[in-house]
Image (cartoon, grey):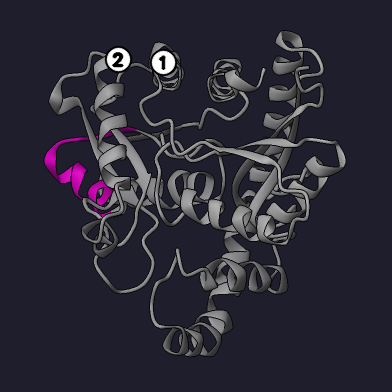
Protein backbone atom coordinates (compact mmCIF):
# COMPACT_ATOMS: atom_id res chain seq x y z
CA UNK A 1 0.00 0.00 0.00
CA UNK A 2 1.22 3.55 -0.69
CA UNK A 3 2.39 5.58 2.29
CA UNK A 4 -0.56 7.66 3.53
CA UNK A 5 1.47 9.94 5.81
CA UNK A 6 2.21 13.47 4.57
CA UNK A 7 5.53 14.36 2.99
CA UNK A 8 7.33 16.89 5.17
CA UNK A 9 8.75 20.02 3.56
CA UNK A 10 11.41 21.81 5.59
CA UNK A 11 11.53 25.31 4.13
CA UNK A 12 14.70 26.95 5.36
CA UNK A 13 16.48 30.30 5.20
CA UNK A 14 19.50 31.85 6.90
CA UNK A 15 17.88 33.30 9.99
CA UNK A 16 17.30 36.47 11.92
CA UNK A 17 17.79 37.78 15.46
CA UNK A 18 14.81 37.65 17.78
CA UNK A 19 14.89 41.42 18.26
CA UNK A 20 16.82 44.43 16.92
CA UNK A 21 18.82 44.73 20.14
CA UNK A 22 22.47 44.32 21.02
CA UNK A 23 21.97 41.21 23.23
CA UNK A 24 19.83 39.50 20.56
CA UNK A 25 22.39 40.31 17.86
CA UNK A 26 25.20 38.99 20.03
CA UNK A 27 23.42 35.63 20.41
CA UNK A 28 22.61 35.45 16.71
CA UNK A 29 26.06 36.47 15.45
CA UNK A 30 27.79 34.12 17.86
CA UNK A 31 25.92 31.15 16.37
CA UNK A 32 26.24 32.37 12.79
CA UNK A 33 29.92 33.33 12.81
CA UNK A 34 31.02 30.21 14.73
CA UNK A 35 29.86 27.99 11.87
CA UNK A 36 32.95 26.52 10.18
CA UNK A 37 31.19 26.73 6.83
CA UNK A 38 30.90 30.50 7.23
CA UNK A 39 34.35 31.22 8.67
CA UNK A 40 36.90 28.45 8.18
CA UNK A 41 39.79 29.89 10.19
CA UNK A 42 41.45 27.64 12.81
CA UNK A 43 39.12 27.45 15.80
CA UNK A 44 41.48 28.70 18.56
CA UNK A 45 42.44 31.78 16.53
CA UNK A 46 38.90 32.48 15.41
CA UNK A 47 37.54 32.00 18.96
CA UNK A 48 39.84 34.77 20.18
CA UNK A 49 38.91 37.11 17.33
CA UNK A 50 35.19 36.38 17.57
CA UNK A 51 34.84 36.61 21.34
CA UNK A 52 37.55 39.15 21.99
CA UNK A 53 36.77 41.66 19.25
CA UNK A 54 33.79 41.03 16.97
CA UNK A 55 31.13 40.17 19.56
CA UNK A 56 32.16 43.23 21.56
CA UNK A 57 31.68 45.66 18.67
CA UNK A 58 29.57 44.31 15.81
CA UNK A 59 26.30 43.47 17.69
CA UNK A 60 25.65 47.11 18.56
CA UNK A 61 26.27 48.27 14.98
CA UNK A 62 24.15 45.46 13.55
CA UNK A 63 21.31 46.23 15.97
CA UNK A 64 21.17 49.80 14.66
CA UNK A 65 20.96 48.46 11.10
CA UNK A 66 18.15 46.06 12.00
CA UNK A 67 16.25 48.86 13.71
CA UNK A 68 16.05 50.66 10.35
CA UNK A 69 14.13 47.80 8.71
CA UNK A 70 12.28 46.19 11.66
CA UNK A 71 8.51 46.34 11.26
CA UNK A 72 5.45 46.00 13.44
CA UNK A 73 5.46 42.35 12.36
CA UNK A 74 9.07 41.97 13.50
CA UNK A 75 11.96 40.86 11.33
CA UNK A 76 11.21 41.35 7.61
CA UNK A 77 12.84 38.02 6.79
CA UNK A 78 10.75 36.16 9.37
CA UNK A 79 7.54 37.91 8.35
CA UNK A 80 8.09 37.12 4.66
CA UNK A 81 9.23 33.55 5.38
CA UNK A 82 6.05 32.83 7.33
CA UNK A 83 3.99 34.15 4.42
CA UNK A 84 6.00 31.93 2.04
CA UNK A 85 5.35 28.91 4.26
CA UNK A 86 1.61 29.57 4.36
CA UNK A 87 1.39 30.28 0.63
CA UNK A 88 3.37 27.18 -0.31
CA UNK A 89 1.19 25.04 1.97
CA UNK A 90 -1.93 26.47 0.32
CA UNK A 91 -0.70 25.78 -3.23
CA UNK A 92 0.36 22.24 -2.35
CA UNK A 93 -2.95 21.57 -0.60
CA UNK A 94 -4.87 22.78 -3.65
CA UNK A 95 -3.01 20.41 -5.95
CA UNK A 96 -2.27 17.51 -3.60
CA UNK A 97 -4.76 17.50 -0.69
CA UNK A 98 -3.27 16.20 2.58
CA UNK A 99 -0.07 15.12 0.80
CA UNK A 100 2.34 17.69 2.24
CA UNK A 101 3.12 19.39 5.52
CA UNK A 102 5.32 22.51 5.31
CA UNK A 103 7.40 23.73 8.25
CA UNK A 104 9.71 26.74 8.42
CA UNK A 105 13.18 26.60 9.96
CA UNK A 106 16.17 28.92 10.13
CA UNK A 107 19.79 27.84 9.99
CA UNK A 108 20.63 30.30 12.77
CA UNK A 109 18.27 31.63 15.41
CA UNK A 110 14.64 30.59 15.75
CA UNK A 111 12.84 28.45 14.74
CA UNK A 112 15.85 26.17 14.49
CA UNK A 113 16.44 23.32 12.06
CA UNK A 114 16.09 20.89 14.96
CA UNK A 115 12.74 22.43 15.95
CA UNK A 116 11.44 22.23 12.39
CA UNK A 117 12.46 18.60 12.04
CA UNK A 118 10.80 17.79 15.37
CA UNK A 119 7.54 19.38 14.23
CA UNK A 120 7.59 17.33 11.04
CA UNK A 121 8.19 14.18 13.08
CA UNK A 122 5.20 15.01 15.30
CA UNK A 123 3.12 15.34 12.13
CA UNK A 124 4.12 11.73 11.22
CA UNK A 125 6.27 12.83 8.26
CA UNK A 126 8.58 9.87 7.63
CA UNK A 127 9.67 11.39 4.31
CA UNK A 128 11.20 14.88 4.34
CA UNK A 129 12.28 17.23 1.58
CA UNK A 130 14.77 19.87 2.75
CA UNK A 131 14.35 23.01 0.64
CA UNK A 132 16.89 25.73 1.54
CA UNK A 133 15.80 29.01 -0.03
CA UNK A 134 19.21 29.59 -1.61
CA UNK A 135 18.84 29.40 -5.41
CA UNK A 136 22.61 29.17 -5.84
CA UNK A 137 24.41 26.39 -3.95
CA UNK A 138 27.25 27.31 -1.60
CA UNK A 139 29.11 25.48 1.13
CA UNK A 140 28.47 28.53 3.33
CA UNK A 141 24.68 28.36 3.05
CA UNK A 142 23.16 25.27 1.45
CA UNK A 143 25.73 22.80 2.73
CA UNK A 144 25.62 24.39 6.18
CA UNK A 145 21.88 23.74 6.24
CA UNK A 146 22.49 20.11 5.30
CA UNK A 147 25.05 19.94 8.15
CA UNK A 148 22.37 21.06 10.60
CA UNK A 149 19.90 18.48 9.27
CA UNK A 150 22.54 15.77 9.50
CA UNK A 151 23.22 16.71 13.12
CA UNK A 152 19.54 16.19 13.92
CA UNK A 153 19.46 12.89 12.04
CA UNK A 154 22.36 11.53 14.07
CA UNK A 155 20.27 11.78 17.24
CA UNK A 156 16.94 10.73 15.71
CA UNK A 157 15.80 7.24 16.64
CA UNK A 158 13.31 7.07 13.77
CA UNK A 159 15.18 8.50 10.79
CA UNK A 160 12.94 9.76 7.93
CA UNK A 161 13.75 9.31 4.27
CA UNK A 162 15.40 12.46 3.00
CA UNK A 163 15.57 14.40 -0.26
CA UNK A 164 17.79 17.49 -0.34
CA UNK A 165 17.35 20.34 -2.81
CA UNK A 166 20.86 21.38 -3.77
CA UNK A 167 19.99 24.43 -5.89
CA UNK A 168 17.56 25.91 -8.39
CA UNK A 169 19.69 28.68 -9.88
CA UNK A 170 18.73 27.82 -13.47
CA UNK A 171 15.20 26.56 -12.92
CA UNK A 172 13.08 27.96 -15.79
CA UNK A 173 10.22 29.02 -13.49
CA UNK A 174 12.63 30.79 -11.12
CA UNK A 175 14.21 32.71 -14.00
CA UNK A 176 10.77 33.55 -15.40
CA UNK A 177 9.56 34.87 -12.04
CA UNK A 178 12.64 37.06 -11.65
CA UNK A 179 12.26 38.37 -15.19
CA UNK A 180 8.59 39.14 -14.59
CA UNK A 181 9.36 41.14 -11.45
CA UNK A 182 11.96 43.20 -13.30
CA UNK A 183 9.69 43.80 -16.31
CA UNK A 184 6.95 45.02 -13.98
CA UNK A 185 9.37 47.52 -12.46
CA UNK A 186 10.54 48.74 -15.87
CA UNK A 187 6.97 49.14 -17.12
CA UNK A 188 6.41 51.63 -14.28
CA UNK A 189 9.82 53.28 -14.00
CA UNK A 190 11.39 52.73 -17.40
CA UNK A 191 14.70 50.98 -18.12
CA UNK A 192 17.70 52.13 -16.04
CA UNK A 193 21.05 53.08 -17.52
CA UNK A 194 22.39 49.94 -15.84
CA UNK A 195 20.73 46.98 -14.15
CA UNK A 196 22.85 45.42 -11.38
CA UNK A 197 22.41 41.80 -10.36
CA UNK A 198 23.84 41.91 -6.84
CA UNK A 199 24.57 38.57 -5.15
CA UNK A 200 25.83 37.92 -1.64
CA UNK A 201 29.59 37.45 -1.82
CA UNK A 202 31.96 34.82 -0.50
CA UNK A 203 35.73 35.02 0.04
CA UNK A 204 37.60 34.49 -3.22
CA UNK A 205 39.61 31.78 -1.46
CA UNK A 206 36.44 29.70 -0.97
CA UNK A 207 35.81 29.77 -4.72
CA UNK A 208 39.41 28.85 -5.48
CA UNK A 209 39.02 25.91 -3.07
CA UNK A 210 36.02 24.56 -4.96
CA UNK A 211 32.84 26.35 -3.87
CA UNK A 212 30.77 26.59 -7.11
CA UNK A 213 28.59 29.45 -5.87
CA UNK A 214 30.01 32.26 -8.06
CA UNK A 215 29.63 30.15 -11.19
CA UNK A 216 25.97 29.53 -10.38
CA UNK A 217 25.47 33.27 -9.75
CA UNK A 218 26.89 34.01 -13.19
CA UNK A 219 24.64 31.39 -14.75
CA UNK A 220 21.56 32.92 -13.12
CA UNK A 221 22.55 36.41 -14.29
CA UNK A 222 23.20 35.24 -17.85
CA UNK A 223 19.86 33.43 -18.08
CA UNK A 224 18.06 36.42 -16.60
CA UNK A 225 19.69 38.86 -19.03
CA UNK A 226 18.75 36.53 -21.87
CA UNK A 227 15.13 36.30 -20.68
CA UNK A 228 14.96 40.11 -20.50
CA UNK A 229 16.70 40.46 -23.88
CA UNK A 230 19.25 42.85 -22.37
CA UNK A 231 22.26 44.11 -24.30
CA UNK A 232 25.61 43.24 -22.72
CA UNK A 233 26.23 46.85 -21.64
CA UNK A 234 22.81 47.14 -19.99
CA UNK A 235 23.57 44.91 -17.01
CA UNK A 236 26.35 43.66 -14.78
CA UNK A 237 26.87 41.22 -11.93
CA UNK A 238 28.30 42.34 -8.59
CA UNK A 239 28.85 40.86 -5.11
CA UNK A 240 27.81 42.46 -1.83
CA UNK A 241 28.05 41.93 1.94
CA UNK A 242 31.76 41.22 2.33
CA UNK A 243 33.13 40.79 5.83
CA UNK A 244 36.69 40.93 7.14
CA UNK A 245 39.90 41.94 5.42
CA UNK A 246 40.56 39.20 2.89
CA UNK A 247 39.60 39.51 -0.77
CA UNK A 248 36.05 38.45 -1.70
CA UNK A 249 34.54 37.79 -5.09
CA UNK A 250 34.53 40.89 -7.27
CA UNK A 251 33.31 43.29 -8.54
CA UNK A 252 32.00 44.66 -5.25
CA UNK A 253 28.49 46.15 -5.32
CA UNK A 254 29.32 49.19 -3.19
CA UNK A 255 32.51 50.09 -5.06
CA UNK A 256 30.72 49.65 -8.38
CA UNK A 257 27.90 51.99 -7.38
CA UNK A 258 30.41 54.61 -6.23
CA UNK A 259 32.20 54.40 -9.57
CA UNK A 260 29.29 54.28 -12.04
CA UNK A 261 28.26 57.99 -11.93
CA UNK A 262 31.78 59.01 -13.01
CA UNK A 263 31.29 56.71 -16.02
CA UNK A 264 28.10 58.49 -17.04
CA UNK A 265 25.69 55.99 -15.47
CA UNK A 266 23.27 58.16 -13.54
CA UNK A 267 20.24 55.88 -13.24
CA UNK A 268 20.52 52.36 -11.83
CA UNK A 269 18.24 49.60 -10.67
CA UNK A 270 19.46 46.81 -8.39
CA UNK A 271 17.94 43.36 -8.00
CA UNK A 272 19.29 40.61 -5.73
CA UNK A 273 18.53 37.24 -7.40
CA UNK A 274 20.25 35.22 -4.67
CA UNK A 275 17.80 36.31 -1.97
CA UNK A 276 14.44 34.52 -1.88
CA UNK A 277 13.13 37.00 0.69
CA UNK A 278 13.96 40.58 1.52
CA UNK A 279 16.13 40.94 4.59
CA UNK A 280 18.79 43.16 6.15
CA UNK A 281 21.14 42.68 3.19
CA UNK A 282 18.57 43.95 0.70
CA UNK A 283 16.46 46.41 2.67
CA UNK A 284 19.27 48.11 4.60
CA UNK A 285 22.53 47.32 2.82
CA UNK A 286 21.27 47.78 -0.74
CA UNK A 287 18.25 50.06 -0.47
CA UNK A 288 19.70 52.41 2.16
CA UNK A 289 23.51 52.14 2.31
CA UNK A 290 24.24 51.54 -1.33
CA UNK A 291 21.60 53.99 -2.47
CA UNK A 292 23.50 56.67 -0.50
CA UNK A 293 26.85 55.58 -1.99
CA UNK A 294 25.45 55.97 -5.50
CA UNK A 295 23.65 59.27 -4.96
CA UNK A 296 26.60 60.81 -3.08
CA UNK A 297 28.84 59.87 -6.01
CA UNK A 298 26.66 61.84 -8.43
CA UNK A 299 23.86 59.45 -9.32
CA UNK A 300 20.39 60.79 -10.08
CA UNK A 301 18.08 57.80 -9.68
CA UNK A 302 18.47 54.59 -7.67
CA UNK A 303 15.84 51.95 -7.21
CA UNK A 304 15.86 48.55 -5.57
CA UNK A 305 13.64 45.88 -7.13
CA UNK A 306 12.25 43.71 -4.30
CA UNK A 307 13.02 40.02 -3.90
CA UNK A 308 10.43 37.52 -5.08
CA UNK A 309 9.15 37.10 -1.52
CA UNK A 310 5.62 35.60 -1.57
CA UNK A 311 4.77 36.55 -5.15
CA UNK A 312 2.40 34.03 -6.69
CA UNK A 313 4.87 33.05 -9.44
CA UNK A 314 7.60 32.51 -6.84
CA UNK A 315 5.40 30.24 -4.74
CA UNK A 316 4.41 28.29 -7.85
CA UNK A 317 8.11 27.86 -8.60
CA UNK A 318 8.72 26.45 -5.12
CA UNK A 319 5.75 24.12 -5.55
CA UNK A 320 7.18 22.92 -8.87
CA UNK A 321 10.52 22.22 -7.17
CA UNK A 322 8.78 20.30 -4.40
CA UNK A 323 6.81 18.20 -6.86
CA UNK A 324 9.83 17.38 -9.04
CA UNK A 325 11.79 16.15 -6.03
CA UNK A 326 8.91 14.25 -4.44
CA UNK A 327 7.28 12.69 -7.50
CA UNK A 328 8.51 9.21 -6.55
CA UNK A 329 6.95 9.62 -3.10
CA UNK A 330 3.47 10.58 -4.33
Please name the residue shown 78% across and 26% down the image. Answer: 6
Query: 172 or 29: which is nearer to us?
Result: 172
Task: Tell me where residue 215 appears, x and y as whole percent.
Answer: 25, 41
Residue 129 or residue 66, whichever sits in front: 129
Judged left or right of residue 204, residue 166 is right
Badge 1 or badge 2: first in the primary sequence: 1
Magenta part of the chain: 255-269
Whether 263 is among the magenta residues is yes
Q: Residue furthest right?
A: 122
Residue 167: x %, y % from top left: 43, 36
Indicate whether residue 37 is drawn in magenta. Answer: no
Identify which residue is drawn at 69% across, 47% down: 105
- In the picture, the quarter occupied by the N terminus is top right
> Which type of secondary structure does the marked residue at label 2 adopt?
helix
Q: Are marks 1 and 2 in contact (CB under 8 Å)?
A: yes
Give me the disc on residue 227. Answer: 2
- Label 1 Cα crowd, 10 Å radius (few <14 / some 14-19 / many 20+): some
Report the disc number at residue 176.
Answer: 1
**Residue drawn at x 46%, y 43% as measured from the top left:** 287
Amino acid sequence: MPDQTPVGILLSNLGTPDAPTTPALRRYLKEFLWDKRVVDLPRPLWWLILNGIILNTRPQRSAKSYQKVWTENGSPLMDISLRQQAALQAVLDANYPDAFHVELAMRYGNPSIAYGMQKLAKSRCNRVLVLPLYPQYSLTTTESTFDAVDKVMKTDRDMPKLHLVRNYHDHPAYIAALAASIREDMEVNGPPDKLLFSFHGIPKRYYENGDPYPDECHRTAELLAEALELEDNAWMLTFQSRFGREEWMQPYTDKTLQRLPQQGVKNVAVVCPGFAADCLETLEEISIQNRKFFMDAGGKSFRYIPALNDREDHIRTLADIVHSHCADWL
